[in-house]
Image (spheres, rainbow, N blue to C red):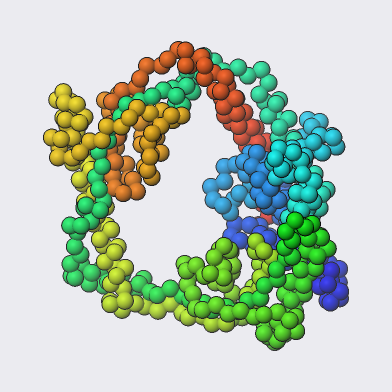
Amino acid sequence: MVNIFRRFQQPLLIVLTVFVIIAFVILYGGPGTRLDRLGSDRVATIYGRNVQPVEYTTIGRQFEICRMLGMFDLIIPLAQNARAMSEVTENYIWNTIVLRTQARKLGIEPTETQVAEAIQNLPAFQNNGQYDHARYSQAVQSVLAPRGMGSAQLEEIIRDSLRIQVLKDLLGAGYAPAPDELEAAYVRQYQKVEAALVRVSREEIAKGVQVPADDVQKAFDARKDTLKSAEKRKVQFVVFNLPEKAKDGPAPAAADLQKVADRADDFSAALLAPEAKFEEIAKRFELEVKTTPLFAASERLEEFSKQSNIAAAAFRMTAEKPFSDTLQTDKGYIILHLVETQASKPLTLDQAKPQLVESLKGDRVRELLSLKAADVRKKLEEGVKAGKTFVQAAEAAGVKAEVLEAFSRSESTLKGPDASLIQNAVSDLKPGQTSSALDGPEGTLLVHLIKRQPVDPADLEKQKASMLPMLETQRLDGLLSEWVDRQRAAAGLQLAQPR
């Protein structure tokens, strides 16, 4: 960014604003962020003080560092209760501010020694169970440096992790699970059950479903205003690849990584000039310009196969704003130029027919599958009530029953894509009960619980040692979640209104 400052000698306030906006767009420009509030001097108010955009962005970047280093013990409690991906970063930011504020009040401040030990014990920096300083140095250079961060910011993240651990210790002091808690946990994990099931095949029902031409025509007439081809885009792009680590060699230097980031910023700044031409600027920077074919938002291009954010950015550009922001990739940076837009067009009957047939057939198959499953379930319940076994009731209903080998959550021979569906179904059933219709990958399942095998007191005693840490973790996670929610509610968080 320093090069941009040199190139545009504007008043300091404007420069700082531009810096914040660019950084925010690059890293957090997606839906659900506070980008719409950057026109003000604050993003929000919490604990009676204003949260500046720079602070918000910095903690957001720290979230990215946590994610890349696999620090989920910190992410989960601080990003909890997010109902959508767009809320994850926001929750982390506000809850981090809450954590740091309350930790200061409680006198929870990790020492330098504790921070150093925690860094050395971080799995991302381990090699064969030992701390590997080379991995630490590489993370600082390749993960932190490109985001304008260094070891000091990593240490602050580690302090947050240690603060969380101290809080857990305080909340969990003196906890001992009651006998009924242990037995309930044992039943959920280790008690074996005997069960059977019947399947209603989606494929078998689909074989007999035909869609009349009249139904297709009616559907087309009813939906023709919404039946349109997908909008397509063609873009040019240039890439700025970060230097790669040579085999058995040292990691790239932070200065070399920063040069790539600065070069991408310089290119982006050049595009801000009036009448800027993408290809001419690329030529001046000695960059190869690549061009995509026309593609829809739902298509996966080989060039962007691992970067869904790039394809999404292509559909945010307009004729008035044909250049993208600097987009970060797993290998460096990329900048797009909108070349062509193919507008969405109404489909003719022939063009829309395949998707209409597929839609109508799918609706009919689901309807018949539901009716068939309901009919089979009714016959099964009537047969069992009349004194038949589940297998006998299934035979009478004209379906085949599968008797499963006894299983538990910890010891199961269940295989296939519906194994977890079956396990979850029996956990809510009483012996002799049949589940409601379960939508499986290949059709509908009806699971019947025959019986639960008796609890083995000797095995219960044996498994206590392994269950205690699990119960303690579950309880602590619940207490910590409740504590974070309560403290955040008392923090007086008020988001700034967009201008």
Q: Nearer the viewer, residue 422 or 27?
A: 422
Position of the C terminus, as image quadrant, is bottom right
Residue drawn at 51 percent across, 14 percent down: 461
Within the image, what quadrant is residue 226 found in? bottom left
Up/down of 441 relative to 181, above or below: below
- Horizontal side of 409 relative to 285 (left or right) equals left
- Horizontal side of 186 relative to 42 (left or right) equals left
Residue 403, percent from left and from top? 27, 32
- Horizontal side of 437 relative to 186 (left or right) equals left
Residue 93, percent from left and from top? 69, 48
The residue furthest top is 457
Residue 489 is at least partly visible in this image: no
Up/down of 236 relative to 398, above or below: below
Residue drawn at 42 percent across, 15 percent down: 456
Residue 259, percent from left and from top? 80, 68
Position of the N terminus, as image quadrant, is bottom right
Q: Nearer the viewer, residue 231 or 452?
A: 452
Residue 270 is at least partly visible in this image: yes
Residue 330, percent from left and from top? 65, 61
Up/down of 392 relative to 269, above or below: above
Q: Nearer the viewer, residue 496 or 175?
A: 175
Q: Nearer the viewer, residue 244 or 223?
A: 244
Residue drawn at 71 percent across, 35 percent down: 164
Residue drawn at 59 percent across, 67 percent down: 310
- Horizontal side of 266 relative to 395 (left or right) equals right
Up/down of 423 relative to 337, above or below: above
